Amino acid sequence: MLNSDSATSLLDLEPTTKQFLEDVLAGLRSSPKRLPCKYFYDERGSQLFDQICLLEEYYLTRSEDQIIKEFAEEMADQIGPGVMLVEYGSGSSTKTRALLDKLDDPVAYVPVDISREHLASTAAQLSRVYPQIEILPVCADFTESFSLPVSRRVPTHSAVFFPGSTIGNFEPPEARAMLEQIADLCGRGGGLLIGIDLQKDVSVIEAAYNDSLGVTADFNKNLLDRINRDLAGNFDLDQFGHRAVYADLEDRVELSLVSYSEQSVSIADHLFQFTEGEPIFTEHSHKYTIDGFAVLAAQVGLTLRKSWTDKESRFAVLHLAF
Ligand code: AVJ
């Protein structure tokens, strides 16, 4: 319980600039060039993503919100009483409140996010709304394993809430490893509530990543701007174009930034050459069927217990447990 004179304590495991530089140099030295999408989410990137969530074309957020609002009680029943709820990529936690409202006497809520500023403001706001739940924010890259904070009351079990289809950013082997890490973290008991974007008409998916207002293009290019700001880069943002194309074989939309011309870019004291039309891949977003995801989860011992979809079957939330 947080009393009025205690600030929200925050476990800060945010990746350092050194790690950012190492990851950027390694990505731009690979062929094809790539950059880790987890670095999209600096303060500006998180704000742009919040705008993406409101876009007409980007159906994912409102579809998932509709599902959670409609079925929160059933989801809470699946998770059970006295839980420590750990949310990966908590962002603004707008999805979570409908679930927190229905949980039976949750002991603690642990938002985990890579954007420290976003996390601190979200945690402070939630501790005001839910004074009866201990809010224990963790600033971390959840793709790396981390230990759970200790709550004042001992939870009956932990459950992980992983909304937003962020699991889609992982290649299948990494997605499997992520599910294994989550299974180890929550163990038997609450299990995992996870949002997945479903396979559908490709034109609907591609429109969601090529919005008419250009917000996704700004989101994608903000990564180059962050490199310029944080790593003394000299990317000319007008010399790179946003591209988002669905790759049928891999069942994913692939975001990239394409060099409009032959050019060189320096980062710190490293020089990188680009040919005209050369892409930097910045994000893959995999799309699943419910059965296909259940097969993947079964590889780490998680069984599909229940699933819910929106009215247009565009998105699904799955409950998986041992
Ligand atoms: C937050 C990773 C789920 O893949 O749809 C939105 C990020 N990228 N628009 C997604 C994103 C471009 C989003 N995830």
Image (cartoon, rainbow, N blue to C red):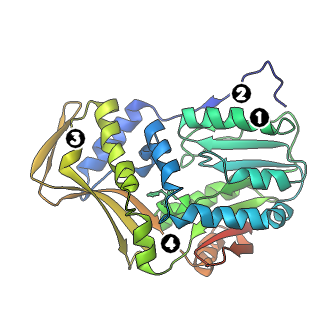
In the rendered image, which residue does mark 4 sit on?
287
Give the label, 2 or 1, closer to the camera: 1
Q: CA distance from mark 3 to mark 1?
A: 40 Å
In the rendered image, which residue does mark 1 sit on?
127
Mark 3 belongs to which amino acid? Phe
Give percent across and percent down for residue 241. 24, 55
Residue 252, by quadrant, is bottom left
Which quadrant does the N terminus fall into? top right
Tell which circle, 3 or 1, labels the residue nearer the N-terminal end: 1
Mark 4 belongs to which amino acid? Lys
Mark 2 residue crowding within 10 angstroms, few (<14) / some (14–19) / many (20+): some
At horizontal 39% and vertical 55% (from top left) the residue drawn is 216
Mark 2 belongs to which amino acid? Thr
Mark 3 residue crowding within 10 angstroms, few (<14) / some (14–19) / many (20+): some
In the rendered image, which residue does mark 3 sit on?
235
Residue 305: image tag:
none
Do residues under tags 3 and 1 come within 8 Å of each other at their CB atoms?
no
Q: CA distance from mark 2 to mark 3?
A: 38 Å
Do residues under tags 2 and 1 come within 8 Å of each other at their CB atoms?
yes
Residue situated in front as seen by the camera: 265 or 206? 206
In the rendered image, which residue does mark 2 sit on?
8
